[in-house]
Every structure is written in C-alpha cells, then in structure tokens.
Image: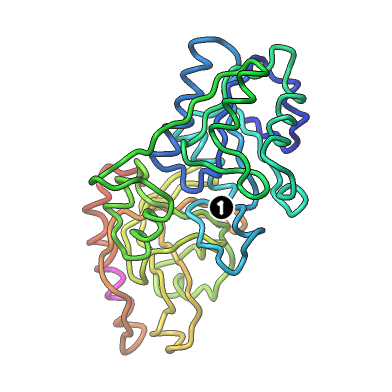
Amino acid sequence: MQVLTDIAGLKDLTGPLHLAIGVFDGVHLGHRAVIEAARESAACDGGSAVVVTFDPHPVEVLAPENSPRLLTNTPHKLAVLEREAGIGLVLLVRFDREFASHLGGAFVERLLQAAPPEGIARICVGEEWRFGKGRSGDVALLERIGKERGFAVSGLGLVEIDSQRVSSTRVREAVAAGDLETAARLLGRRYSVFGAVVRGRQLGRTIGFPTANLAVSREQLPPAGVYAVTAAGAGDSWNGVANLGIRPTVEGETGELRLEVHLFGLDHEIYGEELEVTFVRKIRDERKFEGLPALQAQIAEDVAVARAPLSGAVSP
C-alpha cells in the first residue's frame, strides 16, 4: 500500500482520481460502500482509486473530552483498508486545529489543485458526511463545486442491518457489550484490535503458557474475560487464547487492564512486533484462583476449549 501524508503528493498519481473521503473508523460496511463506489468508478473510467482519511480522529482534536474509543487506530485502519477493501492508495491527512479552521470548500480546492493533470473524476462520501469549519462542507457543496470544476459526486446512502443504520457508534456499543456477533455483522469481519507486543512479568512461561502482552492504544475493548482468538503479525499467524483483564490471581484486585495472548505454536520472541488480535468467541469470565496450580489447570482447559471454535481459522 502507498500512503501519502501530504496532499501535494496526489500530483504524482495516475489520473484521473476517484476519491473516497471519510474518517472511516472501523472500516465497517457503510464505509466499505463509499470505498467500493470509488473503486468501481476507477475500474470503469480509468485512473486511480484513493481513500482520503484523517489522523488523528477529528473528535480527538475538536472535542477530546468527548473522544470515543477507536475501532481502528491509524496503523490498524490502514491494514484493514488494504486487506479487506483492497485499497492500494491512501492519502492520510493530518487533522489539527489549523486544518479544522478552514471551510469545507477550501479543502476541496486543495485536492483539486494537487491533482494530476487529468484531475479528479469523482468524489465519493457518505450522504450525511460533514467536513470543514462549522460543518460547512456536505454533499450539496461537493455537487456545486463538481459542476463548476468537472467532477462527479456520489453521496452514498446509509447501509442498514436489522433495520438500523450501520455506524461506528453502533459497532462500538456492540463490542463494549460483548456482542461480538453483532459487531462482526456490522463490520463484515470479526472484531480485532491492533498493538505492539511489550514485555510483561513473563509469568506465563513459568507455568507453561507464555503470553504476548499487547499494548492497545485507544481502541475499544470487549468486556474482561477469556477469549478464543486469532492473531496475525511478524509475517505469521496463529490461533490462540487471550485473557483480557486485571489478572486477579497474581495482581490482586488492583491490577491494570491487560490483553495477554497465548499463541499456539509460537516458539520465538516477538517483542516490539505489531499484532492484530481478532476475537472469535468468549470462553468465560475472568476470575481469581486460589493459586498458580489452579490457574495453570484452568488455562490448560481454556486452551482445549478454544481449539474448537478456532478449528480451521488459521494455521497454528
């Protein structure tokens, strides 16, 4: 995937450009409809399909006190765009106070000025998307500018599942409630989180179940518990079992929330590597055991239970 971090970089792409613009947190089925419209337009008319998105999430800049947990941090979003949406070109626009101070029309003008000689053929957005200072940009504005400057506009309607709109908020609420099935239907894939493997206390290896501790940055987590999971990263993939919780048996009731993953068949260190951990099914709630032998026996049982829903998921 080619990731541009400067709007000026558009000039070096093969035109005309077919842009899908949005925050796209989670890259759910509603987002996928916008992105697919740009891909189909490029396939029919030639040129390049480009996803234009923002880092960080605009709410983190404009109203940090109301900033929600993310469904996909930026590296995670890029990975999902490439794998699930088949996108090879992304313009990652830095969102800051200065950028937010400009009206929506100014942003469109910057895109037009930076485009290659063939220009912009189409801009695809969700029909309710707003952008620019004071939410001054919308589909109507894009259509007015498009008529003047010669590009088409696709304002994609809402995607509905179970007679309700697909939205990042709805996905976030489902994950927070532990409803992984609903989250998967809204996303079009199982829910996952993304982070770097960091060093822990290395207690797991002393009881025969070494774990990778994942530092998850700002992403929404499901409720605490033990889960059957898959993981991918470091050029490999695994099935596994994860504990999400405070580890009361070894930390008491004051431990910090951690995501630890025991990966079946992993036989080497992966500290510093980035992993995407996908939640397949919850096995049980987290609970405190009388001591390490009881915890060890329970983990062995958890591993056995986890293998059933993971059968055929990835190669161990």
> Which quadrant: the N terminus?
top right
Depth check: 74 or 109 in front?
109
- Residue 170, quarter of picture: bottom left
Q: Main secondary structure of the magenta part?
A: helix
Relative to 304, 89 lies left or right: right
Residue hosting label 1:
73
Decide: is 283 above or below 71.
Answer: below
Looking at the rendering, the stretch of residues picked out in magenta corresponds to 296-300
Depth check: 85 or 131 in front?
131
Decide: is 164 above or below 66.
Answer: above
Whether the magenta-drawn stretch holds residue 263 is answered as no
Whether the magenta-drawn stretch holds residue 299 is answered as yes
The residue lying at 46 percent from left, 36 percent from top is 127
Depth check: 150 or 35 in front?
150
Relative to 175, 16 lies left or right: right
* Structural crowding at the residue carrying mark 1, measured as other residues with C-alpha within 10 Å and reported as few (<14), some (14–19) or many (≥20): many
The residue lying at 56 percent from left, 52 percent from top is 73
Rendering coords of residue 293 (x, y %): 32, 82
The residue lying at 47 percent from left, 55 percent from top is 193
The residue lying at 66 percent from left, 58 percent from top is 61
Rendering coords of residue 192 (x, y %): 42, 52
